[in-house]
Image (cartoon, rainbow, N blue to C red):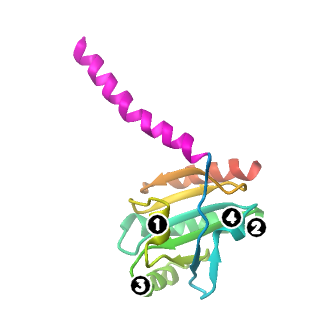
């Protein structure tokens, strides 16, 4: 009996930080940033206040990022006209490969370059990809680390919820 209690306590201890993080994420103001985009212009997160924003941190060497990107593009095309913005933040050391990958995959959402990793450090990104959904009020409402097939449906459900607010 004592062993089962220890296992339960261990599992509960693992689950507690996850639920605490989710609660904290819903109240945390997204740090503002400005990064150069694929088009050459700078983009600032705060310019999108009032919109629901998905920020996706990715890298060209990340297989799941490559798999997810066309699905993100479909989401962007579907919801962009109704108050939704997507910013793909590439963390490669140089923009050349990222530019090639974005063009090869036909990405239509803004691609930004964080070659110094300052923004990814600011957002405590340790996993590729990391995806944040930011509400109209500028707070981080959802955080996803990694990618598995099917996550895109979670993104869609969360985007719809945030658009209704």
Neighbor class of circle 3 (other Cα within 10 Å; few <14, some 14-19, many 20+) is few
Report if residue 107 is visible in the image. no
Can you give x and y, in whole percent of width and height, for residue 139 in the image? 64, 53
Circle 4/circle 1 CB separation < 8 Å: no
Of the two numbered discs 4 and 1 in the rendering, the one whose residue sits closer to the viewer? 1
The residue at the point 59 percent across, 62 percent down is 31
Q: Is residue 40 left or right of residue 78?
A: left
Of the two numbered discs 4 and 3 in the rendering, the one whose residue sits closer to the viewer? 3
Q: Check disc 3 and report the residue beneath it.
A: 94
- Marks 3 and 1, how far apart at CA: 15 Å
SS at badge 4: helix
SS at badge 3: loop
Q: Which residues are magenta?
A: 1-26
Q: Is residue 79 magenta?
A: no
Circle 4/circle 3 CB separation < 8 Å: no
| Marker disc for residue 81 | 2
Counting residues from the N terminus, which is met first, the one under dot 2 or under dot 3? 2
Can you give x and y, in whole percent of width and height, for residue 21 in the image? 49, 43
Q: Is residue 20 magenta?
A: yes
Of the two numbered discs 4 and 2 in the rendering, the one whose residue sits closer to the viewer? 2
Neighbor class of circle 4 (other Cα within 10 Å; few <14, some 14-19, many 20+) is few
Circle 3/circle 1 CB separation < 8 Å: no
- Marks 2 and 3, how far apart at CA: 31 Å
Counting residues from the N terminus, which is met first, the one under dot 3 or under dot 1? 3
- Marks 4 and 2, how far apart at CA: 8 Å
The residue at the point 49 percent across, 60 percent down is 123
């Amino acid at each position: 009996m004592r062993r089962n209690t220890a296992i339960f306590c261990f599992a509960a201890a693992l689950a507690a930080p996850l639920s605490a993080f989710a609660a904290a994420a819903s109240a945390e103001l997204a740090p503002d940033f400005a990064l150069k985009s694929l088009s050459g212009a700078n983009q600032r997160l705060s310019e999108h206040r009032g919109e629901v924003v998905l920020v996706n941190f990715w890298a060209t060497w990340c297989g799941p990022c490559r798999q997810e990107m066309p699905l993100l593009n479909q989401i962007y095309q579907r919801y962009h006209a109704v108050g939704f913005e997507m910013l793909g933040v590439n963390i490669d050391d140089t923009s050349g490969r990222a530019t090639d990958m974005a063009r090869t995959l036909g990405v239509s959402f803004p691609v930004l370059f964080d070659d110094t990793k300052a923004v990814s450090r600011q957002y405590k990104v340790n996993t590729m990809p990391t995806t944040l959904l930011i509400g109209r009020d500028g707070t981080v409402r959802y955080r996803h680390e990694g990618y598995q097939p099917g996550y895109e449906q979670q993104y869609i459900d969360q985007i719809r919820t945030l658009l209704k607010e």
